[in-house]
Image: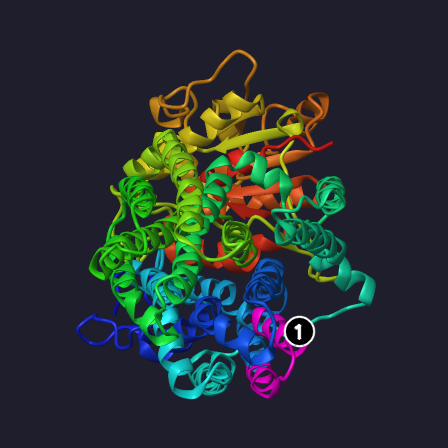
Amino acid sequence: MPSAGDTRTPERISEAGAPRVNPFGARFVAPLYLGASLNPVNSSIIATALVAIAAALHIPVGDTAILISSLYLTSALAQPAAGRLAEEFGPRRIFVAGITLVLAAGIVGSLAHSLTALIVARVLIGAGTSAGYPAAMLLIRRRAEQAGHAAPPREVLGGLSITGAATVAVGPAIGGLLIGWAGWRAAFWINIPVAAIALVLALAGIARDPDPVRFGSPRALASRIDLLGMLGFGGSLTALMIFLDALPRLDWPALAAALVLAAALVGWELRAAQPFLDVRLLVANGALTRTYLRNGLTLMGTYVILYGLTQWLEVARGLSAYQAGLMLMPMGVLTALAARVVSRRAAVRWPLIACAVLLLVGAVATLFVGSDTPIAAVICVTAVFGLTSGAGTVANQTVLYQEAPAAALGTASGLLRTFGYIGSIASAAITGTAFHRGVSDSGLHSIAWVLVAISALVLVMTVLDRQLARADRHHTNQPPAGARNPGPAPSTEPTRTESRSTDMTTGTHTTPALDPARTALLLMDFQPVVLGVVPDPEGVLARAGEALAWARAHGAHVVFVRVALAEKDAAAVPARNKTFSQAVAAGYLTDGTAATAVHESLKAEEDDLTVRKTRISAFASDTDLRAALRARGVDTLVLAGLSTSGVVLTTLRQAADEDYRLFLLADATADPDPEVHRVLMEKVFPHQAEIISTTDLAALSTAVE
């Protein structure tokens, strides 16, 4: 029998107490890795086919750049859209639908006889493969929660990064081999067997989505997924791509359209109830926004070399597609090795700094590459970019997982890839501009100078990002990811929890934002008499202190709630009140004692409200809490307290009935019974409140217009 503090169910443990089945075994992760690799491999495999496609279709090589940018544009749009759809309809459904679309795209591309048909195939490939990564991130988080893990094992997230990063780098080598053997159509038909295998593995290894699909009316569905936001995002990116594709000619109308549409998008998303692009979150969560920018710039630099050097090797050095791809093989190997090494580390700051330094070193080295440079030296230069790609991809993904709200992880993961694809689109524009008059050494050096500027910017951004250092100090002191959560308020890193709730009647989502001026933080029963009966009292008390610091910093109201019985209160307790009659008999809730005082670490200030309650609910107090909150203009409550099944349950229920907007700090709440805590948090409270963690408060405290 498990101990009282063991949250594992009997089915998950053997007689010896060890897990019977690895929840992240090959049966589960194999389809995720394969599906997530389809997009990056299609991004890179085309590099060695461009010259052959141009020759077969009798068009200039420069015209084939549309095959790169069309996939990147589609992917940039579809990645966050697929993530949002996975959040709405279930990650397995979207994952399977995406792979099915890739199958169809492989057939279209294999039969194509024109550039237009190839563009259609690349668009379909971009749309289908975009489901893989954001859906995989959601599936991994869901599996971790179902298995009782505080977070998925680092090797699992690392494997996802390794697969994507390595396939980007080895794609040209694979493409060169296939195209040299079977012609340029191999870059398209290879999707057919790979997608078929991924589909079979997904259907067999990934459990069905538990929730039924609820479409509702077309208008409600469009509102839930923010269709107008998606269209605005797509329009602004399309206009930007047209501008970049026209370089070195400056297409001012396209740039103006991109800026106007972007401004309109921001205005719409600030008013949308369920924004596709949460502008407030991007502004408030600087660490997440900087991760997007850093990832996009790093991949811009990597892809500039991937495409620019490949074309230079084929044209300026006269290598075949196979030979050019083979030369990039060491880059792919080092990408995988660097990703594996970084995935085993909890810290991210130094890997990201190393990534930026290597990017700068590679850029400077490219300045000295020319037609007479030994092949071995060229391979060494590409190897540097392999290390950059592997380290940067894994570290940025780790920061994303730590900083993104759990409920929006699919969209956030898609946006990470979107910024990468924007960087890739820009890299194609840089390459096309540098080689506009022909592929030459001078064009390669022009690319290198642009890359020097990019890498310098990435290095400065990373070194000056203090949040990375703070995150490292926090996360390196935590148990390894994948360790089981021992109780209701663990001292390990509080995982990000729901920051969007679902209306159980309409199925619509609402994205919360806290206006501190209308918000009160209720710290309930943080008293020695209660702290002594919950697991990890120091941890939950520390997180209550963090919430208090947030309230002080942002101007939110603070209410301290404590339970204590004066002599007249004790005399008024009837014997039929089972809980308080026992407390009176034991005398442990007597007012005026140290045991019933608010813990000394939570210091009250002059403007704070302190109420003494004589029953379980915070509203059953010697102060009219309702009137006091109403006088301060409070309509939103952030709750934290001890215990979950006591003051938290009764206060939350009563506050919900009185129409307060409610947020519950899961990591600053605890109960003597871990299983009761879990059931309330997962099954009961989400119907009335947003379940968040203290780390979510800063991102949610943007004032509401």
Name the residue furthest left. Answer: 16
Q: How many labels does the image show?
A: 1
Identify the residue under disc 1: 213
Left or right: where 309 falls relative to 188 = left
| Residue sitting at x 62%, y 84% | 112
10 Å neighbourhood of mark 1: few (<14), some, or many (≥20)?
A: few
Left or right: where 647 falls relative to 543 = right
| Residue sitting at x 70%, y 71% | 214
Could you say which is closer to the camera, residue 591 or residue 420? Answer: 420
Instruction: Characterize the magenta stretch by its predominant secondary structure.
Output: helix
Which structural element holds mark 1? loop
Q: In this view, does 7 lie above or below 549?
A: below
Magenta residues (range): 103-126
Q: Is residue 310 above or below residue 45?
A: above
| Residue sitting at x 55%, y 30% | 521
Left or right: where 401 falls relative to 626 = left
Picture coordinates of residue 649, whole percent (x, y): 54, 47
Does the magenta portion include 120?
yes
* Placement of the N terminus among the 4 image quadrants: bottom left
| Residue sitting at x 38%, y 29% | 464
Picture coordinates of residue 84, whole percent (x, y): 61, 60
Does the magenta portion include 73?
no
Could you say which is closer to the camera, residue 13 or residue 677? Answer: 13
Q: Which colour scheme is used?
A: rainbow
